[in-house]
Each structure stands twice: as structure tokens, then as C-alpha cells.
Image (cartoon, rainbow, N blue to C red):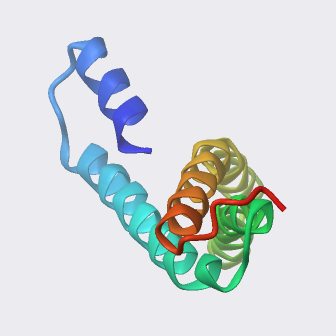
Amino acid sequence: MLLPLAFVYFHSGAPLRVEDLKIVGAVAIAGVVVVSLCGFATPRFRGVAAVLMGVLCGIGVLVFGGYVLARLVGGFEASAAIFTGALAVSIPSGIAGGIVGWLNRLAGGTADMS
């Protein structure tokens, strides 16, 4: 999740500000939470179910977190922007969760696709 964000910042040519680092920090924390949750949840499943569980963890954490943060912040524009941002970031997070589930499936020795 950090790679596309870093690409956008470096491609823009603008210097990094404190506000930019706060966004990058939040994305990094979300990535650590998603990978940790997927790492604990997916070894309990076999085959494709581990990959699907990883995708659901990756998407669900950010959608739920975006919803909670939008409710806490309040205001129409701010809450809508936060939830929309969470939905946009949940796509690469779901992909990362699926990869974690797939890697855990391979590490667990369950190489069958059932």
C-alpha cells in the first residue's frame, strides 16, 4: 500500500510536509494491522479459503476502520472524504491480504486448491 502512495508523492515533485507524513504513517499502520490480522486468521483455513479469508480481512479492516473514523470525525465533507479514502485504499489492502493468505497456505503445507 505504501508503494503507490510513495510513487504519487515522488512523482509530484512537491516536498514532503508534516501532514503528508501523517497520511503515510496512517497507511503504514493500516498495512501492519491488515498483515498481522491475516497472518493470524488465514492459517486456520485450507486451500482457496485461506486466500479468500485474507482478501476479506484486507478489505474488511479498512472499510470498518474508515466507517468508524468517519463517524468519529463527523461533518459531511470530512466523513465522506475519509470513508471514500478508506474504500480506495481497501482494494490494494485486499490484494495484500490475499497474498498473505496464499503465502500462509503454502507455508502450512496445504498445496491443494480445495
Left or right placement of residue 43 versus residue 71 in this view: left
Q: Is residue 24 above or below residue 88?
A: below
Left or right placement of residue 50 versus residue 31 in this view: right
Q: Residue at x 66, y 65 (%)?
A: 54
Q: Residue at x 30, y 14 (%)?
A: 12
Residue 14 position within the rendered picture, expressed as x and y whole percent measured from the top left: 21, 20
Q: Quadrant of the C terminus?
A: bottom right
Q: Quadrant of the N terminus?
A: top left
Toward the right, the furthest residue is 114
Q: Is residue 71 above or below residue 88?
A: below
**Viewer-side residue, 57 vs 72:** 57
Q: Is residue 17 above or below residue 48?
A: above
Residue 3 position within the rendered picture, expressed as x and y whole percent measured from the top left: 35, 35
Residue 104 position within the rendered picture, expressed as x and y whole percent measured from the top left: 52, 68
**Viewer-side residue, 105 vs 100:** 105
Q: Residue at x 70, y 77 (%)?
A: 68
Q: Is residue 32 above or below residue 102?
A: below
**Viewer-side residue, 114 vs 12:** 114
Residue 99 position within the rendered picture, expressed as x and y whole percent measured from the top left: 55, 52
Left or right placement of residue 84 versus residue 16 in this view: right
Left or right placement of residue 104 versus residue 24 in this view: right
Q: Quadrant of residue 82?
A: bottom right
Q: Residue at x 58, y 43 (%)?
A: 92
Q: How many marks?
A: 0
**Viewer-side residue, 95 vs 66:** 95
